[in-house]
Image: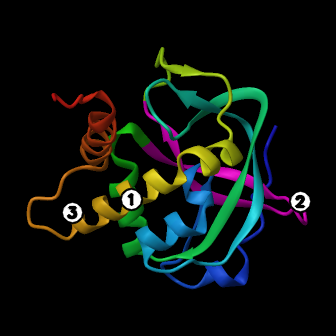
Amino acid sequence: MAMTPPPPAPAAAAKAGAHSVFVYGSLMADEVVRAILKRVPPAAPAILPNYHRFNIKGRIYPAILPVESKKVAGMVVMGVTDEELQVLDAFEDVEYTRTRVEISLTDSSEKMLADTYVWSDAQDPDLYGEWDFEEWKRLHMKDFLAMTNGFMHGLEQPEAKTRVETYQSFMQQQEQPASETRES
């Protein structure tokens, strides 16, 4: 059965070099997008069909993988430049693979193509349950934003750390004060 091609992207993203990116985790927070892209591009609520958003054991950010009959609610960020897409690639690091998907805009049901970041290890035993954005905002956004700002600062350095290295280092520093005891 032949599929008809989706309609063209909205005008805001139609200019040369502009991309639409479906986000479903920490990048749904304007503060995180601003820290990474130095601006907040136009965005709209969207649905990605036949995918599921998982928690990842030991991580505070989610992963998506194809799962028949499931759907992921997120946002489509529009008008992302080529340079900004490269920054997002660096931020998502090796844990994710940028993939072109068809999404539906929540407000109009208009279908469009967008890039998104799919978890690279489809057999990962650390994936479980369903990740919750509101819970993440309440419990983890402040620390995640601090880590993101550190990553972006490091990205400008000659020997930049990967986002995964930055995240692991940041989380170890966060856990250290709780495990240290003072000797009297």
- Disc 1 residue crowd, few under 14, some 14–19, many 20+, Cα 10 Å: some
Q: Left or right of 18: which side holds 157?
A: left
Q: Residue at x 59, y 49 (%)?
A: 25
Give the labeled residue for mark 3.
Answer: 154
Amino acid type assigned to the residue bearing label 1 in the image: Ala
Residue 146 numbered mark, or none: 1
Distance between the Cα atoms at labels 3 and 1?
Answer: 12 Å
- From the viewer's perspective, is the residue at label 3 or at label 1 nearer? 1
Residue at the (28%, 38%) spot, across then down: 177
Residue at horizontal 64%, vertical 31%? Answer: 66
Q: Is residue 103 magenta?
A: yes
Q: Nearer the viewer, residue 72 or 129?
A: 129
**Image quarter of the C terminus:** top left
| Disc 3 secondary structure class | helix
Q: Residue furthest top?
A: 125
Question: Given the image, on which type of amino acid does mark 3 rest?
Answer: Gly
- On the image, the x and y values in percent for residue 14 come to 63, 81
Above or below: residue 14 compared with residue 110 = below
For residue 174, the mark is none
Lower sequence index among marks 2 and 1: 2
Q: Are discs 2 and 1 less than 8 Å apart at CB?
A: no
For disc 3, the neighbor class at 10 Å (few under 14, some 14 to 19, many from 20) is: some
* Percent coordinates x, y for residue 114 in the rendering: 62, 59
Q: Quadrant of residue 79?
A: bottom right
Depth check: 43 or 1 in front? 43
Q: Main secondary structure of the magenta part?
A: strand
Task: Report the residue marked by disc 2.
Answer: 109
At label 2, which amino acid type do we have? Ser
